[in-house]
Image (spheres, rainbow, N blue to C red):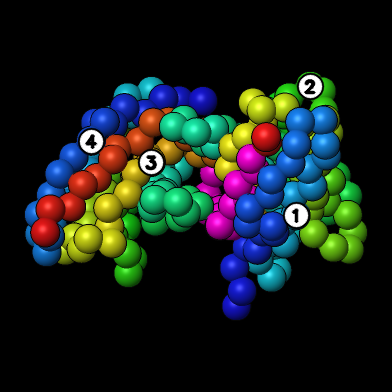
């Protein structure tokens, strides 16, 4: 499976936008870019996914570079409840291979 | 619409006992996945099942672990003769379809297994 690279941790202030980067330079044409997050003591939660075009949903936006070698998850207005580990995943078939993710800290 | 359900949420077993973890997928989902998260570590894929079939068990330990997803009822992850190293959170996920990377998975709250 193609590998993703994310910063180990990030901080953001409450009520400000957060941009979580992900590099995936070895992405293949059939890989979908998925984002999941895991809040403390909970199961992972699906956030968003896309293939080539930018995507928006009620939780977040996903901006995908034109060459698809990187992407950015955008939380438009962070709250304390968004503090979690965020995983950027390349998915081409059934299973999810999780990396270490980015631990997002939200400062009140 | 109920999400993925797992029970029990917490399970304590003594070394050598058996552990049975149950997972009911979301309504309409016929694909189930099991993942394990050891303390302070990441999530690891274990097994993927459809009804009455194991599709991919490449992440399952070779011994003591088994999984099933019968025609009726929940998926079961069974760990025989548990050891302390089996202590972990076990998460189940389900999806509506599969075959490509385009389908998301929905996770349950997990079962936290403690082996004493």
Q: CA distance from mark 1 to mark 2?
A: 20 Å
Say which residue appears at 51% left-offset and 25% top-offset.
A1
Q: Residue at x 88, y 54 (%)?
A: B70
**Badge 2, how many Cα within 10 Å: few under 14, some, many 20+?**
few
Identify residue for label 3: A87
The quarter of the displayed image where residue B14 is located: top right
Quarter of the rendering occupied by the C terminus of chain B: top right
**Can residue A49 be seen from the camera position used here?**
no
Where disc 2 sits, the SS reads loop
Secondary element type, mark 3: strand
Question: Earlier along the polypeptide chain: callout 4 or callout 3?
Answer: 4
Q: Nearer the viewer, mark 4 or mark 3?
A: 4
**For numbered disc 4, what is the local secondary structure?**
strand
> Which residue in the protein does label 2 denote?
B62
Q: Which residues are magenta?
A: B101-114
From the viewer's perspective, is B23 left or right of A7? right
Are the residues tagged 2 and 3 within 8 Å (C-beta)?
no
Give the answer, above or below, for where B109 lies relative to A86: below
Q: Reading the chain from its start, which is encountered first: label 1 or label 2?
A: 1
Q: Which mark is residue B22?
A: 1
């Amino acid at each position: 499976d193609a590998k993703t690279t994310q910063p180990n941790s990030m901080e953001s202030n409450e009520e400000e936008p957060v941009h979580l980067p992900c590099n995936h330079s070895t992405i293949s044409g059939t890989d979908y870019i998925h984002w999941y997050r895991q809040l403390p003591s909970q199961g992972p939660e699906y956030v968003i996914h896309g293939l080539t075009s930018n995507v928006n949903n009620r939780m977040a936006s996903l901006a995908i570079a034109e060459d698809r070698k990187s992407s950015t998850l955008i939380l438009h207005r962070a709250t304390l409840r968004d503090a979690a580990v965020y995983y950027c995943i390349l998915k081409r078939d059934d299973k999810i291979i999780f990396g270490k993710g980015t631990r997002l800290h939200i400062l009140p | 619409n109920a999400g993925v359900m797992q029970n029990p949420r917490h399970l304590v077993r003594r070394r050598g006992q058996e552990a049975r973890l149950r997972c009911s997928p979301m309504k309409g989902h016929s694909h189930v996945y099991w993942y394990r998260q050891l303390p302070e570590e990441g999530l690891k894929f274990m097994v993927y099942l459809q009804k009455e079939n194991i599709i991919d068990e490449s992440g399952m330990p070779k011994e003591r672990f088994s999984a099933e997803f019968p025609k009726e009822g929940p998926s079961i992850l069974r760990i025989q003769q548990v050891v302390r190293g089996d202590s972990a959170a076990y998460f189940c996920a389900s999806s509506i379809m599969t075959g490509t990377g385009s389908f998301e998975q929905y996770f349950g709250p997990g079962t936290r297994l403690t082996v004493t």
